[in-house]
């Protein structure tokens, strides 16, 4: 079995809306939507990676406030450990790269990668994330 890539995902909520953007055109999951996130770098925590990726991809500064359940998903092209970090905006920012705010009730209308099924159900059920401390 191939190595499992550790991924940090910033699930950014602001007044019942979540930050969502399109996947890159060179990605095997092109055409789907995603929460900002990416590979955890060596020596980096999942929290630091989620904050960094959110800033790099969406142009927004965030503060981590909790954890949602981690999941492992096996795609045909890669196996991933998805670490979902609950975040909130940390000040005013101009969104970039087609990221936008989506109301909780509308998330189900957007196509996401299969590995996001559990987090989408968690958000739909309004489950509170586990606090950081």
Image: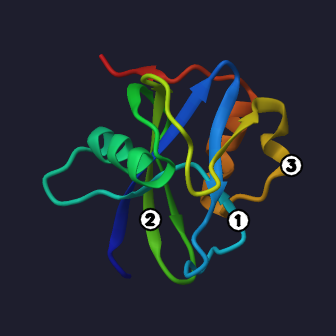
Instruction: State the image quarter where residue 102 is shown.
Output: top right
Element type at mark 3: helix
In the rendered structure, find residue 32 and report the number of the disc placed on it.
Answer: 1
Element type at mark 1: loop
Residue 127 vs residue 26, the one in the foreground: 26
Q: Position of residue 51 (x, y in %)?
A: 36, 40
Instruction: State the image quarter where residue 123 is shown.
Output: top right
Q: Nearer the viewer, mark 2 or mark 1?
A: 1
Residue at 48 percent of width and 30 percent of height = 86
Q: Where the C terminus falls, by quadrant?
A: top left
Residue at 31 percent of width and 48 percent of height = 49
Up-down relation of residue 25 to residue 66 (above or below): below
Up-down relation of residue 32 to residue 86 (above or below): below
Q: Which residue is mark 2?
A: 80
Residue at 38 percent of width and 28 percent of height = 64
Which of marks 3 and 1 precedes in the sequence?
1
Q: CA distance from mark 2 to mark 1?
A: 17 Å
Q: Position of residue 125 (x, y in %)?
A: 74, 27
In the rendered structure, find residue 110 and report the number of the disc placed on it.
Answer: none
Up-down relation of residue 117 to residue 47 (above or below): below
Up-down relation of residue 130 to residue 51 (above or below): above
Q: Alpha-carbon neighbours of circle 2 within 10 Å: few (<14), some, or many (≥20)?
A: some
Q: Position of residue 83 (x, y in %)?
A: 42, 46
Which of marks 1 and 2 precedes in the sequence?
1
Q: Which residue is mark 3?
A: 109
Which of marks 2 and 3 precedes in the sequence?
2
Element type at mark 2: strand
Q: CA distance from mark 1 to mark 3?
A: 12 Å
């Amino acid at each position: 079995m191939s190595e499992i890539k550790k991924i940090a995902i910033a699930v950014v909520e602001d007044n019942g809306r979540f930050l969502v953007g399109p996947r890159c055109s060179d990605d095997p999951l092109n055409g789907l939507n995603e929460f900002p996130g990416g590979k955890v770098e060596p020596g980096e925590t999942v929290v630091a990676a989620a904050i960094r990726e959110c800033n790099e991809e969406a142009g927004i500064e965030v503060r981590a406030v909790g954890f949602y359940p981690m999941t492992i998903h096996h795609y045909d092209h890669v196996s991933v450990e998805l670490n979902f970090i609950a975040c909130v905006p940390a000040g005013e920012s101009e969104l970039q790269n087609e990221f936008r705010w989506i109301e909780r009730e509308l998330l189900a209308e957007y196509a996401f990668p299969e590995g996001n099924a559990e987090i989408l159900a968690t958000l739909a059920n309004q489950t509170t994330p586990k606090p950081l401390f």
